Amino acid sequence: MSLEAPFPEFDELLEMIGEAGARISEINASEGAAGNLSVFMGWQVDPRRKFPVVEEITLPVAVPHLAGGSLLMSGSGRRLREIYRDPLANLGFVAIHPGGETATLYTSPRRIFARLSSEYNSHIAIHNDQVALTGTNFHAVVHAQPRYLTYLSHIPQYRDETYFNHQLLRWEPELIVNLPEGIGLIPFRVPGSPELMQGTVEGLRKHRIVVWCKHGVVARSEISIKRASDRVEYAEAAAHYEYLDLANRKMADGLSPEEIREICRVWSIEQNIF
Ligand SMILES: [Zn+2]
């Protein structure tokens, strides 16, 4: 899937990134400066009126499929909840050069960060992989740290992907509709490491959202950044229900596999979890 012209205005994208950041924060998925987000635009954007400060950078991983495109990305140490108040101070614009090994970073004179997000290798590697696979001209990635999902990933039994999805996707009819591929699980890896980046790229080929065990989640969308943040919210709502049920001695039964299959039949949802 790709966006069709007319493409979103630059200001609209900045506003949507701000709203997604605020929402991630409202659902307690971004304590302190945790979490980061980015969007890839495959069309021409001139950032210089808003981001006139120019710096040449070498990318942490080669992203040949993003060459000629650009990214908006949160700065290291910035708070997702504050982006909407001053997007220019909190975001950088990265124009990827031919070959995908270097880029120009455009920032605002009001910039209040030294570097791009610490997880920026994962962000650009995910965008690169998805563009290579689907040819999309737009792609959004959100990393957040929602409490219930992350807590469940600390319980060994829940680090089995089949068990995790059977337990979580039974709590609301919307879950199988919005996450028909289920939630992927990526074993714990050191934040920012090449191993975490590689595991995440592979996990997001199959899923729209993955859990970084004992750390947080990453969600993607080829429609909008808010769609990616919705995925975090749906998955976290499921984990919250699951936690409530654990705390309440598992008194609820949740939707049965038959009920979920019936939802899928009526709404024409393809899935192979239930
Ligand atoms: Zn994190």
Image (cartoon, rainbow, N blue to C red):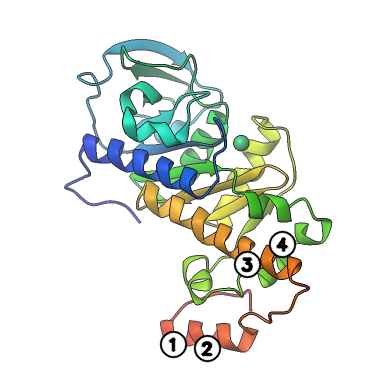
Q: Considering only vertical position in the picture, is 165 above or below 236?
A: below
* Label 2 to label 1: alpha-carbon separation: 6 Å
Q: Considering only vertical position in the picture, is 92 above or below 239?
A: above
Chain-order first, disc 4 or disc 1: 4
* Label 4 to label 1: alpha-carbon separation: 26 Å
Q: Amino acid at mark 2?
A: Glu
Q: Residue at x 57, y 87 (%)?
A: 259
Q: Amino acid at mark 3?
A: Tyr
Q: Residue at x 38, y 10 (%)?
A: 55
* Mark number, residue 161: 4
Residue 101 position, x and y percent, is 48, 22
Q: Amino acid at mark 1?
A: Val
* Mark number, residue 241: 3
Give the SS element for disc 3: helix
* Mark number, residue 266: 1
Q: Are marks 2 and 4 in contact (CB under 8 Å)?
A: no
* Mark number, residue 262: 2
Residue 212 position, x and y percent, is 66, 46
Instruction: Name the quarter showing ligand 1.
Output: top right
Q: Residue at x 38, y 38 (%)?
A: 40
Closer mark to the observer between disc 1 and disc 3 = 3
Count of numbered labels shown in the rendering: 4
